[in-house]
Amino acid sequence: MPRATPEAILLVDGYNMVGAWHELKQVRDRQGLEEARRRLVEALMGYSSYKGFETQIVFDAQYRDSPNIREVITEHVSVYYTDFGQTADSFIERTCADFRQDLRKFKQRLIVATSDQAQKITVIGFGADWMSAERLATDVEFVACRVQRHLKPAKKPTGRFLMHSLDPIAQQRLAQLRSSDHKK
């Protein structure tokens, strides 16, 4: 079965998110940058899958001395490390410029997540949508809560007594306890 075209391509300025998300800043300061990157990728995996986005998380070569690398994490998430000396901002700008000429723009949205105000103006100028780091963090948290709530089985009491809301094994044990008390 062919993969459906994602609703949008989400370009995420990775280090901008690490510096802007309160939780990721704490992780970076306590456990290091590598762990903060890992947590960002992990958070965006579920979000991207739920939203149907193709997410590209971009980290500039600032803390790496390797050439441009693309790691495919899941069907929905890829991580890009720019070439040494290239910034995530220039990578994102080039991607926006290329997308502007791409026919996919008629079927998909391009969303750039960054709180860099200069970057915001540039990507909007290329016709991409902009999302702040705070908005993305809020959306990711909302989606995670929604998925978690959906995964929890809803317990529906079948009567007005507390016992009816217990699972069958607990009900059986309670009945055994009651019957053993009556025998005494």
Image (cartoon, rainbow, N blue to C red):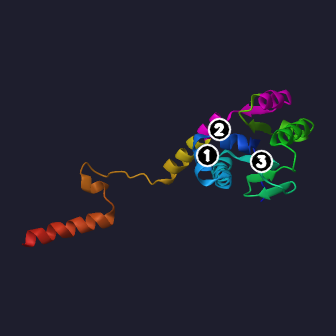
Q: Which residues are magenta?
A: 118-139
Residue 102 is labelled as none
Task: Give the structural element (helix, strand or loop) at label 3.
Answer: strand
**Quadrant in the picture for residue 102:** top right
Residue 124: in magenta span: yes
Residue 145: where, in percent of width, then height?
A: 53, 45
Residue underneath mark 2: 20
Query: What amino acid type is highlighted by mark number 2?
Result: Ala
Q: Give the crowd class for mark 3: few <14, some 14-19, many >=20 residues within 10 Å.
A: many
Residue underneath mark 3: 59
Residue 130: where, in percent of width, then height?
A: 74, 32
Outermost residue to the right: 101
Closer to the camera in the image, 79 or 37: 37
Residue 127: where, in percent of width, then height?
A: 84, 30
Look at the image and tell me in which quarter the C terminus lies: bottom left
Query: What amino acid type is highlighted by mark number 3?
Result: Phe
Residue underneath mark 1: 24
Closer to the camera in the image, 39 or 168: 39
